[in-house]
Amino acid sequence: MERESTPPRIARPEVLWSPTPKALERYGIADAIRERASVKLEAIEIGGEKPWLRITRKDFDAAGVDAYSTNPSMTRQIIADAAVATGNVEIHRGIAIEELLRDGDRVVGVRGKSFEVEARLVVGDDGGNSIVRTQLGIPITLTPFPIDFVTAMIPQWELPPNRARVWIDAKGVRAYIPWPGNEGVLLIPLPPDAPMPEGGEFKRVARPFGHAPAYVANGAALIGDAVHPMTPAGGQGANASIWDALALANVADEALRANDVSRERLLAYERLRRPINEQSVAISRLARHAFRFAFLGPIALRAVETLGWPKRMVLRRFASQFGVR
């Protein structure tokens, strides 16, 4: 069930690291995500007119990873279409869930303004302001990030293909990220009190981050931003959400076959994913602290470029933090 009446067009940068599409190969959708919904990045350049830091194909190869800049709307659609094609999935749009149905302490469905649906297991993937999490009484402490993120679509990509460019100069910081179909997305970090850029269809979002103390309840589970909202730092959010879903699918399948969706049975999912996701959330925490020393950015980036090996180390960490250990 989705709140939007039509598939959303999401103007935001999103990176899928290579282990994620590889994990989806068994479902027959990996190639579509890699080739139709994504651009395989060959370079990332950061700095002024002359980049201070270049991440090249040589660095990706040395780290043994790839980064796919994905159009999140297209990726979602590919996954949704494949799910519906199994004959076992129905998608209902334009439905806003307001509360959970209960039988004692067990969740047995969902309710909105004009509907009730019973379910053996309810899974909440409804974002940082999750209704499902709130209804379950699971608290979360969100830490504000010191900047907001302003995004806009780039309908015609005019920079070199397969290359992301982050400009840092007197005008501020602007990140240009390519998408498939010769499109792209612009990301501008701004202080919360700074005015919006003029012209264009800009969208501004704040990205607080945190980690809920529980993932499951009797008859219910949480995945993605509903349980661990993250910042864009390290490209962890979308990857972690997909790996949550893969892990929960295995646990839920066994629980449903045993006719036991108790919290105790579903805890196997939480025990697996919580320590892994904590490492991903830690990247957002580290990025927040790093903003205190933003004035050292040019020096640090040039030092990393000179040394070389830190680029590969960071790439490997970003590309493996969210997956199965």
Image: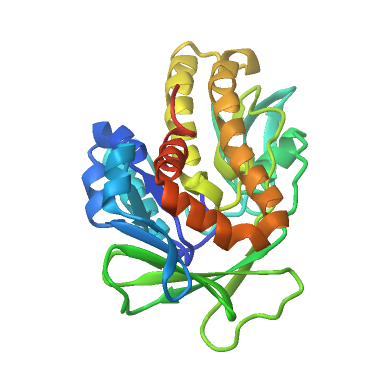
Horizontal and vertical percent position of residue 171: 58, 81
Q: Can residue 111 be seen at all in this image of the molecule?
A: no
Residue furthest out toward the bottom = 199
In the image, residue 110 above or below residue 288: above
Horizontal and vertical percent position of residue 246: 42, 30
Q: How is the image coloured?
A: rainbow
Along the line of sight, the residue nearer the viewer: 171 or 76? 171
Along the line of sight, the residue nearer the viewer: 281 or 267? 281
In the image, residue 10 above or below residue 250: below
In the image, residue 118 above or below residue 184: above
Horizontal and vertical percent position of residue 151: 53, 70
Q: In the visual, does 146 lie left or right of 282?
A: right
Along the line of sight, the residue nearer the viewer: 68 or 223? 68
The residue depicted at 39 percent of the width and 47 percent of the height is: 16
Along the line of sight, the residue nearer the viewer: 176 or 20? 176
Q: How many marks?
A: 0
The residue depicted at 66 percent of the width and 51 percent of the height is: 290
Q: Quadrant of the C terminus?
A: top left
In the image, residue 269 above or below residue 67: above
The residue depicted at 31 percent of the width and 79 percent of the height is: 158
The residue depicted at 28 percent of the width and 38 percent of the height is: 86
Q: Can residue 72 be seen at all in this image of the molecule?
A: yes
Horizontal and vertical percent position of residue 143: 75, 48
